[in-house]
Amino acid sequence: MSNFMVENQTEQVSIFLEDAINLITNYVNYHTLPSLLEETPAGNERYYKGLLASMRRLLVFCEEGQDACFVLLNSQPFRKTAAEKILYKIYHQVIAEFFSPKSDHWYENSRSAYTGKNSIVFQ
């Protein structure tokens, strides 16, 4: 790919990560373990702890990715090889972690495209 395409993708990823960071930060700041247990008294405390930990882990990956994009986009000349490595790392840490989290607190329903339901299912 050309430098322009990689730079454009890096800019788009940076914007996406900024939006994701805002959403996840708002969720993690608003929802606490006691508030989740209060909403559903029959809820599993261990599950909620793991869920919040997974969300914080995902937030850290997003922030690291956005920081790396910021450094790349502000460096002159634009380093295509470094950007490709960062985009690859962001894909594996952020996107793959979202659709297949390490702790399996949620999972992607691969049949959701056929059923019209949400693709992410919380356990």
Image: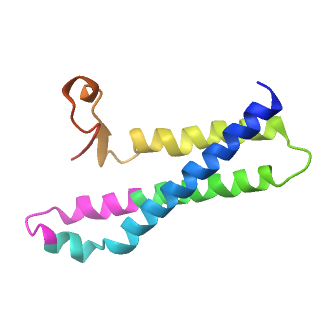
Q: Quadrant of the N terminus?
A: top right
**In the picture shown, does residue 122 fall above or below 31?**
above
> Percent from the top left, x then y, of residue 89?
63, 41
Q: Which residues are magenta?
A: 39-54
- Kindly identify the residue that appears in the image at 91 percent across and 45 percent down: 77
Look at 30% across and 49% down and name the residue there. Answer: 105
In-image side of 28 versus 38 (left or right): right
**At which x and y percent is residue 83?**
75, 40
On screen, residue 70 versus residue 35, left or right, reads: right
Where is 40 relative to 66, above or below?
below
**Above or below, comparing residue 80 to residue 30 in the picture:** above
Residue in the image at 16% along x and 61% along y: 44
Q: Quadrant of residue 26?
A: bottom left
Q: How many marks?
A: 0
Identify the image quadrant of residue 8. Answer: top right
Q: Main secondary structure of the magenta part?
A: helix
Image check: 103 left or right of 97? Answer: left
Q: Does the magenta segment cover residue 42?
A: yes
Position of 101 relative to 112 (above/below): below
Q: Quadrant of residue 31?
A: bottom left
Residue 54 appears at what percent x and percent y? 40, 56
Tell which of 112 and 32 is nearer to you.
112
